[in-house]
Image (cartoon, coloured by chain):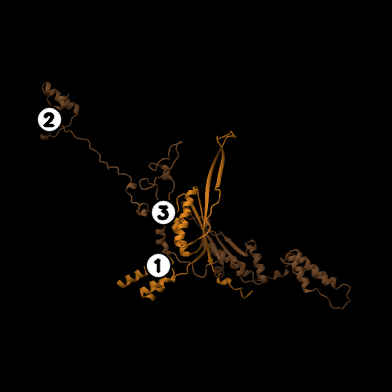
């Protein structure tokens, strides 16, 4: 019974380790510390290599430019602390305006109108050379601290090898 | 009146000593009874009357303490005071903030009882020490960028395929955004291996997805509802176009001159005309004279690359040489 509980503990520890797709070093330490390598290998799959992202482009939109500016400062500071290479951070000079020009009265009096307007401010941030773990951690962190009223769009560019079936021309034509 | 009050005060301990239960009466009635006692005979009261002066229950309230900002140390741990996102609280923020509009000459309203400061999102929970502290906590989940892939030229050689996806984070009732299904796959054409026929056919198959200036082939898929499905479909499209371009169908041999995307001298009227000119007035049975290879190359360049000064000059020289004009 104790041995069974010990095995369950090891399995949960291995799964907990694998959840964050840590590099091979962490799993090797788990294997060496456990000492029962044969038992772990069928249960825990081999850790897949981390993904590579060449670029992460973040688009922010909101109605308050001061909030977007503060959030951009926070995101770039967090990126510096995590060792992420920061790219170009910019914002367009003018906000996007949506205007509706309506009659002031319900029916006639065409000369008297009123204008309603919604302004959307944008901000863009670029980060380069992130691994999959770093990108997931960074995105999780900055998305949790997204202020209310701000929308975030994150575009990631993943680097992959050419698939095996495309590397050589087919033999039979 | 004052004598009546003094008599009331004198009689209080007597009534307390005689603990009797009865019906309480109003104070004005009691006073009247006392007055009547002094002046006339006491009114006969068959019901036992008990009167007690009961004070009103006084509600205890906690004393209003001064704002917390007055007792804060200068070197306190601010992340303990303001750990997460929260509305502005004037007694907790040790800053002399002012916000709002006033008439001319007056100062902006103070931070106490200021609804404007409570409306806007604040970043008081993301101060530089807090960011540093939180990043140190999550640094163990990050992995460094691998060595040997520092520049784009290096990772381009090993990982030529680029997959672009988009995620959205916004305040909607659902966390799913239908725009997140879009997948873009980008690849350089030079990274795929082709022969002449396969390359031509591949370019015809992909059509406007190929950018001649950047040598990039781009597939954008959004017809499936999920990102993984669109990714698999994009790879399938790339695979199908690649393998199909190596298949030679019988009808491809019937390609006419008007469908040629490049000018080939061997299959054009120019060759026939040049041969006609060279073999003009030749005897029957004499060997046919063919135009020189350099002339063919010159004509092909003139038409494929366009008429520029170099090509026209070269064409002039070749024509002179062919016609034996000094």
Q: Are marks 1 and 2 in contact (CB under 8 Å)?
A: no
Q: Secondary structure at mark 3?
A: loop
Name the mark nearer the viewer: 3 or 2: 3
Alpha carbons under labels 3 and 2: distance apart? 71 Å
To which residue does mark 1 refer? A17
Residue B85 in the image: x percent, y percent?
A: 40, 51
Alpha carbons under labels 1 and 2: distance apart? 85 Å
Q: Colour of chain A?
A: orange
Q: Secondary structure at mark 1?
A: helix
Q: Are marks 3 and 1 in contact (CB under 8 Å)?
A: no
The quadrant where residue B249 appears: bottom right
Residue A149 in the image: x percent, y percent?
A: 47, 49
Label 3: how many Cα within 10 Å (few below 14, some 14–19, many 20+): some
Taking the image as drawn, is residue B269 in sight? no
**Marking on residue B127:** 3
Is residue B283 toward the left or the right of residue A93 in the image? Answer: right
**Marking on residue B11:** 2
Residue B35 in the image: x percent, y percent?
A: 14, 23
Q: Secondary structure at mark 2?
A: helix
Q: Is residue A123 above or below residue A159?
A: above
Residue B29 in the image: x percent, y percent?
A: 18, 26
Letter of the chain that mark 3 sits on in the rendering:
B
């Amino acid at each position: 019974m104790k041995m069974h509980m010990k095995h369950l503990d090891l399995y949960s520890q291995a799964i907990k380790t694998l959840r964050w797709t840590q590099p091979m070093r962490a799993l090797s330490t788990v294997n060496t510390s456990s000492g029962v390598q044969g038992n772990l290998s069928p249960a825990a799959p081999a850790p897949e290599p981390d993904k590579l992202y060449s670029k992460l482009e973040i688009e922010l939109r909101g109605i308050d430019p001061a909030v977007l500016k503060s959030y951009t400062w926070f995101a770039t500071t967090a990126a510096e602390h995590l060792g992420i290479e920061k790219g170009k951070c910019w914002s367009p000079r003018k906000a996007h305006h949506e205007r509706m020009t309506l009659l002031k009265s319900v029916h006639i009096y065409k000369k008297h109108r009123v204008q309603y307007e919604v302004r959307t401010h944008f901000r863009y941030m670029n980060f380069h050379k992130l691994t999959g773990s770093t990108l997931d951690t960074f995105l999780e962190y900055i998305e949790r601290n997204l202020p209310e009223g701000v929308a975030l769009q994150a575009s990631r560019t993943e680097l992959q090898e050419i698939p095996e079936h495309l590397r050589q021309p087919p033999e039979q034509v | 009146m004052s004598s009546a009050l003094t008599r009331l005060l004198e009689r209080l301990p007597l009534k307390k000593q005689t603990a009797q239960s009865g019906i309480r009466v109003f104070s004005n009635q009691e006073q009247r009874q006392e007055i009547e006692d002094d002046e006339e005979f006491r009114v006969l009261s068959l019901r036992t009357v008990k009167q007690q002066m009961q004070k009103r229950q006084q509600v205890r309230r906690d004393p209003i303490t001064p704002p917390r900002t007055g007792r804060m140390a200068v070197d306190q741990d601010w992340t303990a005071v303001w750990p997460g996102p929260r509305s502005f609280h004037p007694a907790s923020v040790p800053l002399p903030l002012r916000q709002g509009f006033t008439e001319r000459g007056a100062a902006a309203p103070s931070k106490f009882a200021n609804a404007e400061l409570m409306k806007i999102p604040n970043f008081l929970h993301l101060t530089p020490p807090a960011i540093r502290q939180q990043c140190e906590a999550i640094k163990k989940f990050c992995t460094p960028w691998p060595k040997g892939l520092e520049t784009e030229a290096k990772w381009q050689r090993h990982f030529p395929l680029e997959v672009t996806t988009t995620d959205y984070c916004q305040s909607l009732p659902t966390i799913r955004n239908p725009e997140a299904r879009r997948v873009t796959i980008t690849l350089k054409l030079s990274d795929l291996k082709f022969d002449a026929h396969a390359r031509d056919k591949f370019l015809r198959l992909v059509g406007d997805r190929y950018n001649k200036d950047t040598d990039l082939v781009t597939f954008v898929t959004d017809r499936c509802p999920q990102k993984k499905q669109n990714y698999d479909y994009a790879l399938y499209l790339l695979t199908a176009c690649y393998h199909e371009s190596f298949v030679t169908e019988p009808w491809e041999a019937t390609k006419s001159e008007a469908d040629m995307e490049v000018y080939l001298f061997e299959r054009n009227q120019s060759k026939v005309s040049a041969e006609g000119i060279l073999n003009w007035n030749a005897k029957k049975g004499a060997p046919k004279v063919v135009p020189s290879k350099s002339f063919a190359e010159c004509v092909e360049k003139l038409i494929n690359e366009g008429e520029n000064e170099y090509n026209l000059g070269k064409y002039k020289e070749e024509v002179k040489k062919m016609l034996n004009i000094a």
